[in-house]
Image (cartoon, rainbow, N blue to C red):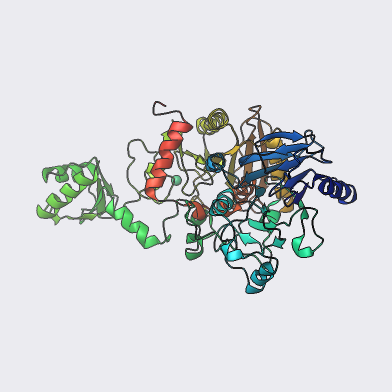
């Protein structure tokens, strides 16, 4: 826990303010920091030493007195616990004074995987903070002189929206007001929560004992990313929607979630699930893009060559022909859709005969196609990860290796969230050959290295194989960059994973380097944490028999935890992060340029 004190406008009453702080620090502390919002200086500019590290939002950035630092006009920083050292936690703090450019803060929030901040400090109140507030509270504020519907600044509201703080403190209006908490994302889906903001306004420091002008406030905060997920998601009963949702924003449409329930199966939950997920729709896609023709009326003893010859006589140029033994039908494959379309027209018009039988032709959806170039024999046409499948969204592919390819997921947690996928369809690690396992490993290591060097980030990769319908699941590995926050945060991330597993009653244990290949009868969750500082890699796994009643990592375990670590629990579900095709193409191009270093720059 980081313990902080926040006070309202000091206006030169340094001694009285610091005296009270010292007293509180003794009684209820030690506190890690004092933040002063509103006007700090009075006519007397000689600031005495403060009893605890103190940060003010007045004047130019820099040291003001012993233990007193001015943060400057706008930006973001982190404050370390007073005890310091290896185990110290870092609190993320954004601040915005009444004037000056907010560019630095905008840039900080625009970085890939921006986490949201623990604390936002502003001098004045944000305009619009009254939206959704009960009349009784509005009246109470009016009693102490705040006409809330006319109060506040747009730039602060915009910063509150942009920085997604867990606490927002403001001064200036000499009133204490703890607004009902609000959630940053609108209308969360019933099962998932987003993190919550508490806005607290403070009265002028050391001026009044009136509780409506309370001027000092203490809070214990377990900062993102150290806070356990339930703490971050804890939504009080009086929680409402963000008052700033009417502001223009580039946020992605989270409300889609509520409208479109997603199956919680391994298939449905994954990003490639078709919109609506319905079978008939997918079949149509397959027909529209089929390059296979169905041939009916074949003699039962017909062979492939005979079928091919008779097709060629009718001007069709199949790449392969195949009769289904003893069944009286077969298939013709073509190398392109247009070849297949032309062939169908000419075959249907030609009264093609084999022996004394007239053949019929139509579009085929053969699942038993002979092998195509580039794709493995067992490529499935109903699998979103098999490149040959019509459902595979190949525009998200960022690179293809010998045995694996990389792509961006639909609705990635952060912009550079990537997947590493074996090209051959396999449902577990046990059925991957050594070359594929090896490439899976090296690709993961290489991406982690790029995240470290190009994005100044740690990386976390994870895979989960559970008790899925036999053979349907196509194994893949998620890899996600996490911006560095301070020294030692990679090891805290490891601790977070261990803790989260413990809370869910399963164990993650360290796994030695080497080939990780659980048996087909086993389910597993494996996570690799790559430290962005040292480049080291730590692997942990939970491996269990598939039929055990023991608790196991849930379907969303890895992503949930990382969403929380990034300070964006609202992005835990891919559906909340889905973007349109053109944005996906933009993300792919950005990934290639920024992470893979392609495209010249
Ligand atoms: Zn597949």
Say which residue appears at 90% left-offset and 51% top-offset: 27
Towards the viewer: 144 or 507: 144
Say which residue appears at 66% left-offset and 48% top-offset: 121
Is residue 82 shown left or right of residue 172?
right
Residue 365, visible in the rendered structure = no
Residue 93 locus on image (x, y percent): 66, 44
- Count the marks: how many? 0
Quadrant hosting residue 311: top left
Towards the viewer: 557 or 9: 9
Residue 584, visible in the rendered structure = yes
Is residue 103 shown left or right of residue 205?
left
Residue 576 locus on image (x, y percent): 51, 55
Quick check: 386 above or below 277? Answer: above
Towards the viewer: 599 or 5: 5
Towards the viewer: 334 or 195: 195
Is residue 477 shown left or right of residue 56?
left
Say which residue appears at 74% left-offset and 48% top-offset: 11
Query: Most extreme residue toward the front, as rendered?
Result: 43
Residue 445 locus on image (x, y percent): 56, 30
């Amino acid at each position: 826990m980081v313990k902080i004190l926040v006070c309202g406008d000091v206006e030169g009453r340094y001694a009285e303010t610091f005296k009270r702080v010292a007293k509180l620090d003794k009684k209820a502390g030690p506190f890690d920091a004092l933040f002063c919002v509103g006007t700090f200086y009075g006519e007397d500019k000689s600031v005495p030493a403060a009893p605890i590290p103190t940060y003010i939002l007045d004047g130019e950035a820099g040291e003001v007195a012993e233990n007193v630092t001015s943060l400057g006009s706008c930006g973001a920083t982190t404050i370390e616990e007073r005890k310091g050292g290896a185990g110290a936690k870092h609190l993320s703090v954004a601040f915005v004074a009444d004037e000056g450019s907010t560019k630095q803060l905008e840039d900080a929030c625009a970085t890939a995987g921006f986490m949201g901040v623990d604390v936002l400090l502003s001098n004045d109140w944000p305009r619009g903070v009254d939206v959704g507030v009960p009349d009784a509270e509005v009246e109470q504020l009016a009693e102490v002189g705040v006409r809330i519907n006319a109060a506040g600044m747009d730039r602060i509201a915009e910063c509150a929206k942009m920085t997604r703080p867990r606490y927002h403190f403001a001064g200036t209006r000499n009133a204490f007001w703890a607004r009902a908490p609000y959630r940053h994302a609108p209308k969360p889906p019933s099962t998932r929560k987003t993190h919550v903001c508490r806005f607290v306004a403070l009265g002028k420091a050391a001026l009044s004992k009136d509780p409506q002008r309370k001027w000092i406030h203490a809070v214990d905060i377990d900062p993102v990313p150290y806070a356990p997920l339930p703490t971050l998601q804890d939504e009080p009963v009086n929680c409402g929607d963000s008052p700033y949702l009417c502001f223009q924003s580039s946020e992605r449409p989270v409300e889609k979630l509520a409208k479109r329930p997603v199956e919680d199966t391994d298939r449905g939950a994954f990003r490639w699930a078709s919109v609506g997920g319905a079978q008939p729709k997918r079949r149509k896609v397959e027909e529209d893009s089929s390059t296979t023709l169905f041939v009916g009326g074949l003699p039962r003893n017909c062979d492939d060559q005979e079928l091919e010859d008779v097709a060629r006589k009718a001007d069709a140029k199949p790449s392969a022909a195949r009769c289904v033994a003893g069944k009286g039908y077969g298939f013709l494959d073509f190398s392109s859709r247009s070849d297949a379309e032309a062939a169908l027209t000419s075959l249907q018009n030609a009264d093609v005969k084999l022996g004394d039988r007239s053949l019929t032709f139509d579009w085929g959806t053969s699942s038993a196609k002979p092998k195509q170039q580039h794709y493995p024999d067992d490529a499935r046409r109903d699998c979103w990860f098999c490149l040959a499948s019509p459902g595979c969204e190949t525009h998200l592919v960022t690179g293809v290796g010998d045995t694996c390819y990389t792509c961006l997921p639909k609705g990635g947690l952060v912009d550079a969230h990537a997947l590493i996928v074996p090209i051959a369809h396999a449902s577990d690690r046990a059925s991957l050959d050594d070359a594929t396992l090896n490439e899976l490993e090296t690709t993961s290591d290489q991406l982690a290295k790029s995240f470290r060097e190009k994005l100044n980030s740690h990386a976390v990769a994870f895979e989960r194989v559970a008790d899925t319908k036999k053979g349907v699941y196509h194994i893949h590995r998620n890899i996600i960059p996490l911006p560095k926050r301070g020294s030692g945060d990679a090891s805290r991330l490891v601790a977070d994973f261990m803790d989260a597993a413990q809370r869910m009653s399963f164990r993650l244990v360290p796994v030695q380097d080497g080939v990780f290949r659980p048996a087909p009868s086993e389910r597993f969750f494996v996570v690799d944490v790559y430290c962005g500082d040292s480049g080291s890699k730590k692997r942990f796994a939970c491996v269990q028999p598939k039929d055990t009643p023991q608790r196991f990592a849930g379907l969303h375990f890895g992503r949930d935890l990382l969403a929380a670590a990034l300070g964006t629990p609202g992005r835990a579900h891919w559906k909340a992060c889905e973007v349109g095709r053109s944005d996906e193409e933009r993300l792919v191009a950005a990934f290639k340029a920024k992470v893979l270093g392609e495209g010249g720059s």
